[in-house]
Amino acid sequence: MPAVPGREAAAALDEAADRARPSLHLMSPARARDCYERESARTGEAPLPVSDVRDVAVNSRVQARLYRPTEGALPVVLFFHGGGWVVGSINTHDQMCRELALRSGCAVLSVGYRLAPEYPFPAAVDDAEAALSWVRGHGGEHDLDIDRLAVAGDSAGGNVAAALTIRARAMGVPLRLQLLFYPVTTTDLSVGIDPQYEGLVLSREELASHQDHYLPNDTDRHRAESSPLDCADLRGLAEAVVVVAECDPIAPQGLRYAEALQAAHVPVTVHLHPGSIHGFAQFPGAFETGRTALGQAADALQRALLDERA
Protein backbone atom coordinates (compact mmCIF):
# COMPACT_ATOMS: atom_id res chain seq x y z
CA MET A 1 0.00 0.00 0.00
CA PRO A 2 1.37 3.44 -0.90
CA ALA A 3 1.82 5.95 1.89
CA VAL A 4 -0.76 8.71 2.23
CA PRO A 5 0.34 12.36 1.98
CA GLY A 6 0.44 14.05 5.36
CA ARG A 7 -2.09 16.66 6.48
CA GLU A 8 -0.15 19.66 5.20
CA ALA A 9 0.66 17.95 1.92
CA ALA A 10 -2.96 16.87 1.42
CA ALA A 11 -4.16 20.43 2.06
CA ALA A 12 -1.68 21.78 -0.49
CA LEU A 13 -2.82 19.23 -3.06
CA ASP A 14 -6.48 20.13 -2.43
CA GLU A 15 -5.72 23.82 -2.85
CA ALA A 16 -3.91 23.14 -6.12
CA ALA A 17 -6.86 21.07 -7.35
CA ASP A 18 -9.25 23.90 -6.50
CA ARG A 19 -7.27 26.28 -8.73
CA ALA A 20 -7.92 23.88 -11.61
CA ARG A 21 -5.24 25.36 -13.85
CA PRO A 22 -3.61 23.28 -16.60
CA SER A 23 -0.31 21.62 -15.76
CA LEU A 24 2.65 23.88 -16.42
CA HIS A 25 3.97 21.65 -19.19
CA LEU A 26 0.77 22.25 -21.16
CA MET A 27 1.49 25.99 -21.27
CA SER A 28 4.06 27.88 -23.29
CA PRO A 29 7.33 28.25 -21.37
CA ALA A 30 6.74 32.00 -20.97
CA ARG A 31 3.25 31.51 -19.54
CA ALA A 32 4.41 28.63 -17.34
CA ARG A 33 7.16 30.79 -15.89
CA ASP A 34 4.77 33.61 -15.12
CA CYS A 35 2.30 31.20 -13.49
CA TYR A 36 5.02 29.53 -11.40
CA GLU A 37 6.34 32.91 -10.22
CA ARG A 38 2.86 33.99 -9.12
CA GLU A 39 2.05 30.70 -7.41
CA SER A 40 5.39 30.63 -5.60
CA ALA A 41 4.54 34.04 -4.16
CA ARG A 42 1.06 33.00 -3.00
CA THR A 43 2.20 31.85 0.43
CA GLY A 44 2.06 35.43 1.69
CA GLU A 45 5.11 34.87 3.89
CA ALA A 46 7.13 37.95 4.72
CA PRO A 47 10.75 37.47 3.64
CA LEU A 48 12.92 36.32 6.51
CA PRO A 49 15.29 39.13 7.51
CA VAL A 50 18.86 38.35 6.48
CA SER A 51 21.75 40.63 7.39
CA ASP A 52 22.70 41.36 3.78
CA VAL A 53 20.98 40.37 0.53
CA ARG A 54 22.28 41.66 -2.77
CA ASP A 55 21.95 40.79 -6.45
CA VAL A 56 25.23 40.28 -8.30
CA ALA A 57 26.20 39.63 -11.91
CA VAL A 58 28.10 36.40 -12.48
CA ASN A 59 28.56 37.46 -16.10
CA SER A 60 26.53 39.16 -18.83
CA ARG A 61 24.13 36.18 -19.00
CA VAL A 62 23.79 35.01 -15.41
CA GLN A 63 22.48 36.90 -12.39
CA ALA A 64 22.67 35.62 -8.82
CA ARG A 65 21.54 36.64 -5.35
CA LEU A 66 23.93 36.55 -2.41
CA TYR A 67 22.60 36.04 1.12
CA ARG A 68 24.94 36.80 4.03
CA PRO A 69 23.49 36.00 7.48
CA THR A 70 26.32 37.66 9.42
CA GLU A 71 29.44 39.77 8.94
CA GLY A 72 32.91 38.30 8.60
CA ALA A 73 34.41 35.75 6.26
CA LEU A 74 31.81 33.10 5.47
CA PRO A 75 31.80 29.81 3.62
CA VAL A 76 29.47 29.77 0.63
CA VAL A 77 26.79 27.45 -0.71
CA LEU A 78 25.96 27.69 -4.42
CA PHE A 79 22.21 27.04 -4.74
CA PHE A 80 20.34 26.03 -7.89
CA HIS A 81 16.54 26.32 -8.02
CA GLY A 82 14.16 23.68 -9.30
CA GLY A 83 11.54 23.96 -12.01
CA GLY A 84 12.32 21.29 -14.58
CA TRP A 85 15.08 23.46 -16.11
CA VAL A 86 12.22 25.45 -17.68
CA VAL A 87 10.63 27.52 -14.89
CA GLY A 88 11.79 28.89 -11.54
CA SER A 89 14.15 31.68 -10.57
CA ILE A 90 16.08 33.21 -7.72
CA ASN A 91 12.75 34.80 -6.69
CA THR A 92 10.75 31.57 -6.46
CA HIS A 93 13.31 30.10 -4.06
CA ASP A 94 14.10 33.26 -2.13
CA GLN A 95 12.57 32.07 1.14
CA MET A 96 14.28 28.69 0.97
CA CYS A 97 17.67 30.35 0.48
CA ARG A 98 17.04 32.82 3.30
CA GLU A 99 16.19 29.94 5.63
CA LEU A 100 19.30 28.00 4.62
CA ALA A 101 21.53 31.03 5.16
CA LEU A 102 20.06 31.95 8.53
CA ARG A 103 19.98 28.44 9.93
CA SER A 104 23.40 27.34 8.66
CA GLY A 105 25.33 30.55 9.24
CA CYS A 106 26.76 30.23 5.72
CA ALA A 107 26.48 32.58 2.78
CA VAL A 108 24.19 31.32 0.02
CA LEU A 109 24.61 32.29 -3.63
CA SER A 110 21.39 31.53 -5.52
CA VAL A 111 22.19 31.23 -9.22
CA GLY A 112 19.76 32.32 -11.94
CA TYR A 113 20.98 29.92 -14.60
CA ARG A 114 19.57 30.13 -18.13
CA LEU A 115 16.44 28.12 -18.83
CA ALA A 116 15.33 25.70 -21.52
CA PRO A 117 14.09 25.43 -24.20
CA GLU A 118 15.80 28.66 -25.21
CA TYR A 119 19.02 27.44 -23.58
CA PRO A 120 19.16 23.63 -23.58
CA PHE A 121 21.81 21.41 -21.98
CA PRO A 122 24.57 22.09 -21.13
CA ALA A 123 23.71 25.77 -20.58
CA ALA A 124 22.56 25.27 -16.98
CA VAL A 125 25.72 23.37 -16.06
CA ASP A 126 27.91 25.87 -17.88
CA ASP A 127 26.23 28.66 -15.88
CA ALA A 128 26.76 26.69 -12.68
CA GLU A 129 30.46 26.41 -13.52
CA ALA A 130 30.54 30.15 -14.25
CA ALA A 131 29.05 30.82 -10.81
CA LEU A 132 31.64 28.58 -9.18
CA SER A 133 34.42 30.40 -11.04
CA TRP A 134 32.92 33.75 -10.02
CA VAL A 135 33.00 32.75 -6.36
CA ARG A 136 36.61 31.61 -6.66
CA GLY A 137 37.61 34.76 -8.50
CA HIS A 138 35.49 37.40 -6.76
CA GLY A 139 34.47 35.83 -3.46
CA GLY A 140 37.10 37.76 -1.56
CA GLU A 141 35.43 41.01 -2.62
CA HIS A 142 32.31 39.84 -0.76
CA ASP A 143 34.17 38.38 2.23
CA LEU A 144 33.54 34.80 1.14
CA ASP A 145 35.88 31.96 2.08
CA ILE A 146 36.55 30.32 -1.27
CA ASP A 147 38.18 27.31 0.38
CA ARG A 148 34.91 26.29 2.03
CA LEU A 149 32.43 25.56 -0.74
CA ALA A 150 29.25 23.49 -1.06
CA VAL A 151 26.54 23.12 -3.67
CA ALA A 152 22.81 22.63 -3.20
CA GLY A 153 19.65 22.46 -5.26
CA ASP A 154 16.14 21.09 -5.41
CA SER A 155 14.58 18.89 -8.11
CA ALA A 156 16.09 19.96 -11.46
CA GLY A 157 18.31 22.29 -9.45
CA GLY A 158 19.51 19.21 -7.57
CA ASN A 159 20.41 17.77 -10.95
CA VAL A 160 22.44 20.90 -11.76
CA ALA A 161 24.14 20.75 -8.35
CA ALA A 162 25.06 17.09 -8.84
CA ALA A 163 26.35 17.86 -12.34
CA LEU A 164 28.48 20.70 -10.99
CA THR A 165 29.91 18.35 -8.37
CA ILE A 166 31.01 16.00 -11.14
CA ARG A 167 32.44 18.86 -13.21
CA ALA A 168 34.20 20.39 -10.20
CA ARG A 169 36.00 17.07 -9.63
CA ALA A 170 37.27 17.22 -13.22
CA MET A 171 38.37 20.83 -12.65
CA GLY A 172 40.22 19.91 -9.47
CA VAL A 173 38.00 22.20 -7.37
CA PRO A 174 37.28 20.66 -3.95
CA LEU A 175 33.69 20.85 -2.70
CA ARG A 176 32.84 19.86 0.84
CA LEU A 177 29.18 18.93 0.40
CA GLN A 178 26.49 18.36 -2.19
CA LEU A 179 23.05 18.97 -0.71
CA LEU A 180 20.36 17.52 -2.96
CA PHE A 181 16.65 18.04 -2.30
CA TYR A 182 14.50 15.43 -4.13
CA PRO A 183 16.93 15.59 -7.08
CA VAL A 184 16.47 14.58 -10.69
CA THR A 185 19.28 12.09 -11.28
CA THR A 186 18.25 10.02 -14.31
CA THR A 187 16.56 10.51 -17.66
CA ASP A 188 15.38 6.89 -17.63
CA LEU A 189 11.79 7.27 -16.51
CA SER A 190 11.31 3.50 -16.46
CA VAL A 191 13.36 3.44 -13.24
CA GLY A 192 13.03 7.09 -12.20
CA ILE A 193 9.33 7.14 -11.32
CA ASP A 194 7.42 5.41 -8.54
CA PRO A 195 4.07 4.55 -10.17
CA GLN A 196 2.36 4.62 -6.77
CA TYR A 197 2.73 8.40 -6.68
CA GLU A 198 2.68 9.23 -10.39
CA GLY A 199 0.60 12.38 -10.82
CA LEU A 200 1.16 13.70 -7.28
CA VAL A 201 2.62 17.13 -8.11
CA LEU A 202 4.58 15.57 -10.99
CA SER A 203 3.45 13.31 -13.81
CA ARG A 204 5.43 11.16 -16.22
CA GLU A 205 4.16 13.36 -19.06
CA GLU A 206 5.45 16.50 -17.34
CA LEU A 207 8.85 14.96 -16.61
CA ALA A 208 9.14 13.84 -20.24
CA SER A 209 8.25 17.37 -21.37
CA HIS A 210 10.98 18.83 -19.16
CA GLN A 211 13.50 16.47 -20.73
CA ASP A 212 12.35 17.33 -24.24
CA HIS A 213 12.94 21.01 -23.52
CA TYR A 214 16.28 20.62 -21.75
CA LEU A 215 17.66 17.64 -23.65
CA PRO A 216 16.42 17.88 -27.26
CA ASN A 217 19.39 15.79 -28.46
CA ASP A 218 19.04 12.14 -27.49
CA THR A 219 22.82 11.79 -27.37
CA ASP A 220 22.88 14.12 -24.35
CA ARG A 221 20.42 12.12 -22.26
CA HIS A 222 22.86 9.66 -20.75
CA ARG A 223 25.77 11.97 -20.08
CA ALA A 224 26.97 12.22 -16.49
CA GLU A 225 26.11 15.93 -16.36
CA SER A 226 22.50 15.41 -17.43
CA SER A 227 21.86 12.01 -15.86
CA PRO A 228 24.26 11.59 -12.90
CA LEU A 229 23.17 7.97 -12.41
CA ASP A 230 24.86 7.28 -15.75
CA CYS A 231 28.21 8.59 -14.50
CA ALA A 232 30.68 5.76 -14.94
CA ASP A 233 32.78 6.74 -11.93
CA LEU A 234 31.39 8.55 -8.88
CA ARG A 235 34.47 8.04 -6.74
CA GLY A 236 35.97 11.07 -5.08
CA LEU A 237 32.88 13.23 -5.25
CA ALA A 238 31.89 15.48 -2.37
CA GLU A 239 29.99 14.05 0.57
CA ALA A 240 26.26 14.05 -0.12
CA VAL A 241 23.07 14.74 1.79
CA VAL A 242 20.00 13.59 -0.13
CA VAL A 243 16.54 14.75 0.96
CA VAL A 244 13.68 12.55 -0.23
CA ALA A 245 9.91 13.06 -0.04
CA GLU A 246 8.10 9.78 0.57
CA CYS A 247 5.06 10.60 -1.61
CA ASP A 248 7.11 11.89 -4.53
CA PRO A 249 7.02 10.09 -7.89
CA ILE A 250 10.75 10.80 -8.37
CA ALA A 251 11.78 9.59 -4.91
CA PRO A 252 13.52 6.58 -6.56
CA GLN A 253 15.90 8.98 -8.30
CA GLY A 254 17.25 10.37 -5.04
CA LEU A 255 17.43 6.95 -3.41
CA ARG A 256 19.14 5.30 -6.38
CA TYR A 257 21.71 8.08 -6.58
CA ALA A 258 22.43 7.79 -2.87
CA GLU A 259 22.98 4.05 -3.31
CA ALA A 260 25.30 4.66 -6.29
CA LEU A 261 27.34 7.18 -4.32
CA GLN A 262 27.61 4.79 -1.39
CA ALA A 263 28.79 2.04 -3.73
CA ALA A 264 31.52 4.44 -4.88
CA HIS A 265 32.54 4.99 -1.23
CA VAL A 266 31.20 8.56 -1.11
CA PRO A 267 29.80 9.41 2.35
CA VAL A 268 26.02 9.82 2.04
CA THR A 269 23.22 10.73 4.42
CA VAL A 270 19.62 10.22 3.31
CA HIS A 271 16.75 12.04 4.98
CA LEU A 272 13.42 10.43 4.02
CA HIS A 273 10.40 12.52 5.05
CA PRO A 274 7.22 10.47 5.53
CA GLY A 275 4.03 11.86 4.01
CA SER A 276 5.87 14.63 2.17
CA ILE A 277 5.39 15.60 -1.48
CA HIS A 278 7.72 16.92 -4.14
CA GLY A 279 8.72 20.52 -3.52
CA PHE A 280 7.95 20.58 0.19
CA ALA A 281 11.23 22.20 1.28
CA GLN A 282 10.64 25.19 -0.99
CA PHE A 283 7.85 26.41 1.29
CA PRO A 284 9.04 26.13 4.91
CA GLY A 285 6.22 28.41 6.06
CA ALA A 286 3.62 26.00 4.71
CA PHE A 287 5.23 22.66 5.55
CA GLU A 288 6.56 21.76 8.99
CA THR A 289 8.44 18.95 7.26
CA GLY A 290 10.04 21.62 5.07
CA ARG A 291 11.36 23.41 8.14
CA THR A 292 12.63 20.09 9.50
CA ALA A 293 14.39 19.27 6.22
CA LEU A 294 16.02 22.70 6.07
CA GLY A 295 17.15 22.32 9.67
CA GLN A 296 18.79 18.99 8.82
CA ALA A 297 20.39 20.59 5.77
CA ALA A 298 21.66 23.52 7.82
CA ASP A 299 23.20 21.14 10.36
CA ALA A 300 24.99 19.30 7.56
CA LEU A 301 26.31 22.57 6.14
CA GLN A 302 27.58 23.63 9.54
CA ARG A 303 29.44 20.35 9.99
CA ALA A 304 30.93 20.47 6.49
CA LEU A 305 31.75 24.17 6.27
CA LEU A 306 32.00 25.62 9.76
CA ASP A 307 33.46 22.78 11.79
CA GLU A 308 37.19 23.53 11.90
CA ARG A 309 37.90 19.81 11.92
CA ALA A 310 36.20 19.37 8.53
Image (cartoon, rainbow, N blue to C red):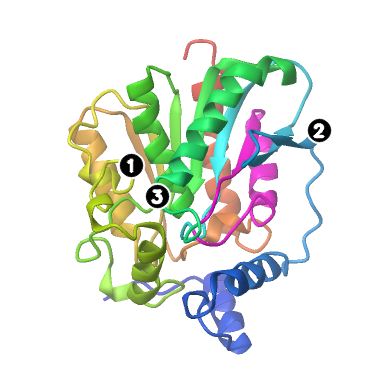
Q: Tell me, yes or no, if residue 121 can be seen here.
A: yes
The residue identified by callout 1 is 225
178 with respect to 281 (left or right): left
Counting from the top left corner in percent of width and height, residue 191 is at 20, 61
Q: Which mark is residue 210?
A: none
Give the quarter of the image for residue 273.
Answer: bottom left
Looking at the rendered structure, the secondary structure element under dot 1 is loop
Look at the image and tell me in which quarter the N terminus lies.
Answer: bottom left
- Asked if residue 264 is positioned above or below residue 215 in the image, the reply reads above
Q: Are marks 3 and 1 in contact (CB under 8 Å)?
A: yes
Numbered disc in front, either 3 or 2: 3
Which residue corresponds to the image point at 37% horizontal and 54% vertical from the top-left?
184
Give the quarter of the image for residue 69.
Answer: top right
Which residue corresponds to the image point at 53% horizontal and 48% vertical from the top-left?
293
Q: Is residue 44 magenta?
A: no
Counting from the top left corner in percent of width and height, residue 21 is at 58, 85
Looking at the rendered structure, the secondary structure element under dot 2 is strand
Q: Are marks 3 and 2 in contact (CB under 8 Å)?
A: no
Which residue corresponds to the image point at 73% horizontal and 21% vertical from the top-left?
142
Q: Earlier in the sequence, mark 1 or mark 2?
A: 2
197 with respect to 108 (left or right): left
The stretch of residues the image draws in magenta is: 86-115
* Residue situated in front as seen by the camera: 161 or 46: 161
Q: Tell me, yes or no, if residue 241 can be seen here.
A: no
Numbered disc in front, either 3 or 1: 3
The kind of residue on which mark 2 rests is Asp
The residue identified by callout 2 is 52
Numbered disc in front, either 1 or 2: 1
Q: Are marks 1 and 2 in contact (CB under 8 Å)?
A: no
The residue identified by callout 3 is 121
